[in-house]
Every structure is written in C-alpha cells, then in structure tokens.
Image: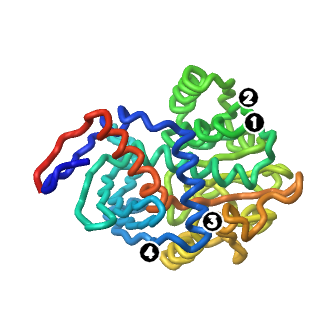
Amino acid sequence: MMSEGSILYLARTDVEKAGVAMPDIIRALEDMFLEKGMGRTEMPPKIGIHPRPDAFIHAMPAYIPKFASAGLKWGGGFPENTGRGLPYISGLIVLNDAETGIPLCVMDASWITAKRTGAATAVAANRLARAGSEVVGVLGCGVQGFSNVEALLCLFPLRRIKAFDLLATAASSYADRVRAELGLAVDVVSSPEAAVRGSDIVVTAGPLLKDPNPVIEDDWFDPGAFASPVDYDSYWKPAVLQNVDKFCTDDVAQMRHTKTLGYFKGIPDRIIDLGDIVSGKVPGREREDERTMSMNLGLALDDMAVAPLVYRAAVARGLGIPLQL
C-alpha cells in the first residue's frame, strides 16, 4: 500500500506489466454482476460532454462494497482520432480508499477498458450463447474486436473468426494478430453479411454513433446465434433488435437514460438486465434456437471490478510512480 499523503500513478505500460490475466478479469466481472443483480452496488448513470460530433468524455463513478472498491473513470471516445494516429478510446481511472475516500491510485484506463469490455461480453455469452459456439463474426477489427475474441476464447471452443472492417488493411492486420496471439483461424470477409451469416456469436465493434446507418438485416442473424454489439446499435437495423428472443444490456437504467440523449431509437421496450441473469432472477438461454443479444454499454462497475486487481498487482511488483498529494 502507498504511504499516507501519496498516490500511485500507473502509466499504460505499468497497467499492462501488472499482469492481470483475462480469466481473472472475467471472474471479477462475474462476481460484480452477481453483486449488481442482488442490489449491492452503487452506480449512477454516466454523465458526459460531447466536444465533437459522435465524440464523448464521460464521468463514470461506482462503488462495489464486496470489493471495497470505489472510484471514477474519466474516459473519452473520439472517432476522428484513428485518422490522427491516436487511440479512439482513452482515459484515466481514479481508485479511492473505500474507508477514507482518499485517492490511492491514478491509472491509465485504456488497457482496462479494452479487457473489461471483452470480459463483459464473455459473461453475457456464458448465459446467452450456445455452449458449443465455435464461429465468431467480428465487424470492426480494432481493439474491441480483439479483446472480445480473447475473452470468448476463455469460455468457448472457438475455431474460426470471420473478420470484416471498412478498412481492408485493418482487417488484414487483425487477422495476423489473432492467428499469432490466439491461435485461431481467421477468414477476412468482404461484407457485413458474410461476417454475420453462419456465425454462432457476432461482435460488432465500430464507433458509437448517435445517428447510425445500420446494415445488418434480420434474416442475416441465424437462429441460435448470440450477438454482442459493443458499438450500441450502430450496425444493427431496428428489425433485428425488435425480433431477438432475448434483448439484454449490462444496465437497464443506463440504457434508458442514454436513450433520452438521442441514442437507441430502435431498441425494444423489453430489456433484461445482465445482473438479473447472473444472479438467477431471470433465465438466460432457454432454447437452442433462441436468438439472443446483450448490448452492453460499458459500466463504471466494470472498471471498479478490475482496477483493484491491477492496483494490488502493480504494488506487489513495485510498478508505478508515487506522487505527493
């Protein structure tokens, strides 16, 4: 632990060197969603500013009593950054001492955001996808396209990825990375339809758009398939959202709040909270042919489940720079 009157700063390289593994992140999110489903967490809907079209910077506080984890992420997403050679998603996490409120650590949020988002997809898929799912269609071959597959591979016998991106070079680089680091076969496909049809799991991971131009048709999404749209409804036509057998999100209150801001124009009224599924209040998949979807928004609770793991591992390894408060 840090000495009184100091705070630990962890750069992105420190966060990565802490060595927290994806299975540990998935387990932490499983525990968090159980706590959430039982009403034992605190998280107001995220608030934000929007300096440019389709760009955002959100303030995301949360508290998980079981983990003694309290803090805030100040995270942004700027789609135009990719053309500038900058990351689309960036931010910082502040972890506080839950007993005193004193800040313990400020850490880069990029790595945690990538990993916990993929882990949340895995938690949802564990309840909503078919147990033997082997083929994943990925639309959007960036950070989330990779981390979602990395997390799914921890729980499913994946054998093939069908990758689509508007930039052919991005899809090609993605395919090389997945083959090298995850050992999976990858087919780079030329259309969204080719990525969706025949996939057991579909992950869409483009930019978040307030007024999207969706392309995925209802009949592309196979019976028995599961989808994780980490880019909201940017790829999915309203008919698909309305016709899935189970439509889930990681936080119903946050989804409805975000809808008041102009997003999610085509989502159904019947929405299931992932915490209710994990806690057993609502069933997950009930039939082989069910089409299921979990449109996770990304929660501050995710960050507060993972940040303590990173902090403790970093302290144990002597990583980071102590700063005076």
Dot 3 corresponds to which residue? 275
Is residue 175 toward the left or the right of residue 87 in the image?
right
Q: CA distance from mark 2 to mark 3?
A: 29 Å
Q: Position of residue 116 (x, y in %)?
A: 50, 49
Q: CA distance from mark 1 to mark 4?
A: 36 Å
Looking at the image, tell me whether mark 4 or mark 2 is earlier in sequence order.
Answer: 4
Query: Given the image, on which type of amino acid does mark 3 rest?
Result: Gly
Single out the mark in the foreground, 3 or 1: 3
Looking at the image, tell me whether mark 1 or mark 4 is earlier in sequence order.
Answer: 4
- Judge the density around disc 4: few (<14), some (14-19), many (≥20) Cα neighbours within 10 Å: few
Is residue 219 toward the left or the right of residue 123 in the image?
right
Looking at the image, tell me whether mark 3 or mark 4 is earlier in sequence order.
Answer: 4
Q: Mark number for residue 289?
A: none
Helix, strand or loop at disc 3? helix
Q: Position of residue 48 (x, y in %)?
A: 36, 69
Q: Residue at x 33, y 65 (%)?
A: 98
**Are circles 1 and 4 on residues that touch, CB within 8 Å?**
no
Looking at the image, tell me whether mark 3 or mark 1 is earlier in sequence order.
Answer: 1
Looking at the image, tell me whether mark 1 or mark 2 is earlier in sequence order.
Answer: 1
Closer to us: 79 or 32: 32
Closer to us: 137 or 149: 149
Placement of 141 over or under 75, stated as above or below = above
Q: Residue at x 51, y 73 (%)?
A: 258
Placement of 93 over or under 60, stated as above or below = above
Q: Position of residue 324 (x, y in %)?
A: 10, 52
Dot 4 corresponds to which residue? 44
